[in-house]
Image (cartoon, rainbow, N blue to C red):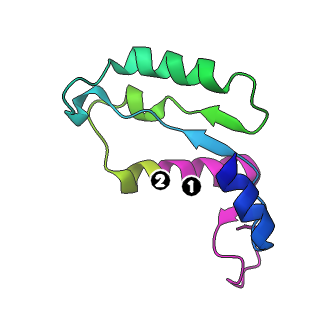
Amino acid sequence: ERARDYLHKTGRFIVIGGIVSPVHDSYGKTGLVSSRHRLTMCQLAVQSSDWIRVDPWECYQDTWQTTCSVLEHHRDLMKRVTGCILSNVSTPSITPVIG
């Protein structure tokens, strides 16, 4: 909530959504609760939000994914769903841009 409010106040961004992406079990952090449970906890945590959602994609992969590949997944999903690209607001483009 604070990050969204801050970005809105800068006047440079319009936040249209937030994504929570629980990491895969093979990430290897000691004491990490199973992804199934973390996914459920995240879904419960955002159930009253009208702008944050949980994406289970990372949990369902065969193994741990790098941050870059997870961000690429979210970028590609956003492009498929909205027809827009994620980019800096000042980047010229003929495709609608979400900053």
Q: How crowded is mark 2: few (under 14 residues within 10 Å), some or many (20 or more)?
A: few
Say which residue appears at 65% left-offset and 44% top-offset: 18
Say which residue appears at 75% left-offset and 67% top-offset: 13
Q: Badge 2 is on which residue?
A: 71
Q: How crowded is mark 1: few (under 14 residues within 10 Å), some or many (20 or more)?
A: some
Does the image show residue 23?
Answer: yes
Q: Is residue 10 above or below residue 31?
A: below
Look at the numbered discs 1 and 2 and tell me whether their residues touch, using CB distance below 8 Å. Answer: yes
Amino acid type, callout 1 = Arg
Q: Where is residue 16 in the image (x, y as percent from the top left)?
A: 76, 51
Q: Does the magenta stretch include residue 86?
A: yes
Question: Closer to the camera, 93 or 1?
Answer: 1
Say which residue appears at 66% left-offset and 27% top-offset: 46
Q: Is residue 78 above or below residue 48?
A: below
C-alpha distance separating marks 1 and 2: 6 Å
Does the image show residue 96?
Answer: no
Q: Where is residue 93 in the image (x, y as percent from the top left)?
A: 72, 80
Label disc, if present, on residue 75 of the rendered structure: 1
Say what secondary structure mark 1 lies in: helix
Question: Closer to the camera, 85 or 12?
Answer: 12
Q: Is residue 13 above or below residue 61?
A: below
Q: Position of residue 9 (x, y in %)?
A: 79, 66
Say which residue appears at 31% left-offset and 43% top-offset: 65
> Residue 7 vs residue 58: left or right?
right
Q: Is residue 87 magenta?
A: yes
The range drawn in magenta is: 73-99
> Residue 93 vs residue 43: left or right?
right
